[in-house]
Image (tube, rainbow, N blue to C red):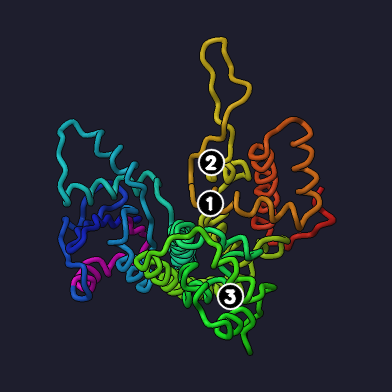
Amino acid sequence: MFYYIGIDVGKFTHCACVMNFHGEVIVEAFFFKNNREGFNSFLDKVKNFINKDHICGLESTGHYGDNLIQFLLNHNFKVGLINPISTDAERKKKIRKTKTDKLDTVIICNVLQSRAYTTITKRKLGLREMKKACRLHASLMEDINQLKNQLQACIDFVFPEFNSLFKTKYIRTYMALLKAFPGASLIANANLTKLKNILKPCGRGRGVELEASHLKDVANNSIGSIDSLTSLEIQQLIARIELIQDHVAVVDKKIEEFASNSNSPIYSIPGIGSFSGTSILCEIGDISTFHSASKVVAFAGLDPSVYQSGEYNAQATAISKRGSPHLRKTLYQIALTICKYNSTFNSYYKLKKEQGKSHRCAQGHVLRKFIRVLYKLLTENIMFDFEQLV
C-alpha cells in the first residue's frame, strides 16, 4: 500500500499527518518543533512508513523547510515539493472557507495523490545550493555596480577630467590613486614621487601609460570642486567595493568547484564559463522534467507571446518574459559571448539582422537556438561538437 505524508511547514512549528492510498488519514495531524528534538519526534511517529512505498510532501515556500528537507533525505524519505498554487486550488474545492495547519496537511496529502509535485533528491538539493550561490553572486555584482555609479557621481564633482586619463576604469591603479588622493586638489598638491609609485608600482601590478607630471597638470587645471566630505565618500565607496569584491571571489571559488566536479556538457560550449554555465544549470534544474527544448525556452520566458482577438492576429509580439527571470538574464548576458566564440551562432545572428530584426530580437533567436543545442547536450549527455552544429 502507498502512503502519503503531508507536512505543513512553519517558522517555529511544523504539522504533519499520514494518509493511505484510499484517502484515509491513518496518523492524525500532529505538531513538531523546527529543531533536532522535533525532527526526531516526527521520525518516531512515521518511521514505520519509510521502508514502504511512500512520498513525503511539503510546499515550496521560502527557506523554512530547507533544514527539514535535508533531514528527510538523510533518513531515506522520498520527498516531493509542491507548488503552493496547487494546494490553494485544492483548498478552494471545499465549500467552507476554512484554513488551519491540520487541514493543510490533509490537503497536501490530496495533492500528493494527484501527483502534482516535483521529487527532490540530494543531487537536486545540491543544485538548489548552487542556485543560491549564483544568485548571491549576481546580487553582489549588482551592489558593486550601484556603488560604482555612486563613485562616478563623486568623481564628476571633485575631478571630472579623471576618467579621460584612463583607458579602463576601476583597474588597480585607478582605484589606488583615488583611494590615496580622492580629488583634483589633493592630486595637484601631492608629492610627485608618491604619484609615480602609484602609477608605476614596483612588484605586483602593472602601471598605466600616464605620467605623474601630466596628471598633476590636469589636476591643477581641473574644474572640480574642493569638498572634503565628497573625498571621504570616495574613499569609503572604494573600501566597500573592494570588500564586496572579496566576497564575490569566495562565492566564485565555490561555483568553480561545482563546475569542475559536475563535468556537465554545458561547459564544453565555447563562451560558457563556470558562473554562466552553473547559473543556467541550476535555474533549469533537472532537464528530464522538460519534455522538449521548447519547454525550456518557455521556462526562460524567451517564447514569443501570442495575441489574437476575433479576426485580428498580431504578427509581431514581444517575448513572454514568463518563467525564471534569473535564467533569462544570464542567457542574455552570454548572447554576445557565444556569438564571438562560435561562427554558427554569429552567422545566425547576422542572418536575423539582415532580415530586419532588431539587435535584441536577433539575440532572442540566437538564444533559442542555443537552448535547442543545450537541450540535446544535456539529455544525451554528450559534449559540444562544433562540426555537428549546423
Marks 1 & 2, CB-CB < 8 Å contact: yes
Q: Which mark is residue 173?
A: 3
Instruction: Kindly give the residue lying farthest to the right in the view shown.
Output: 387
Q: Residue 47 lies in magenta, yes or no?
A: yes
Q: Earlier in the sequence, mark 3 or mark 1?
A: 3
Q: Residue 366 lies in magenta, yes or no?
A: no
Which residue is under mark 2?
Answer: 301
Mark 3 secondary-structure assignment: helix
Instruction: Kindly give the residue lying farthest to the top in the view shown.
Output: 311
Residue 375: percent from the left, percent from the top? 65, 51
Q: Which mark is residue 180?
A: none
Vertical position of residue 22 compared to residue 310: above or below: below
Q: Is residue 133 left or right of residue 207?
A: left
Q: Earlier in the sequence, mark 1 or mark 2?
A: 2
How busy is the neighbourhood of tag 1: few (under 14 within 10 Å), some, or many (20 plus)? many
Tell which tag, 3 or 2, sits nearer the viewer.
3
**Front one among 248 and 294:** 248
Q: Is residue 311 left or right of residue 324?
A: right
Is residue 220 in sight in this rendering? yes
The three-letter code of the residue at mark 2 reads Gly
**Front one among 300 and 12:** 300
Marks 3 & 1, CB-CB < 8 Å contact: no
Q: What segment is highlighted magenta in the picture?
A: 38-58
Tell which tag, 3 or 1, sits nearer the viewer.
3
Residue shown at the point (64%, 71%) measured from the top left: 214
Which residue is under mark 1?
Answer: 327
The three-letter code of the residue at mark 3 reads Thr
The three-letter code of the residue at mark 1 reads Leu
Q: Quadrant of residue 10?
A: bottom left
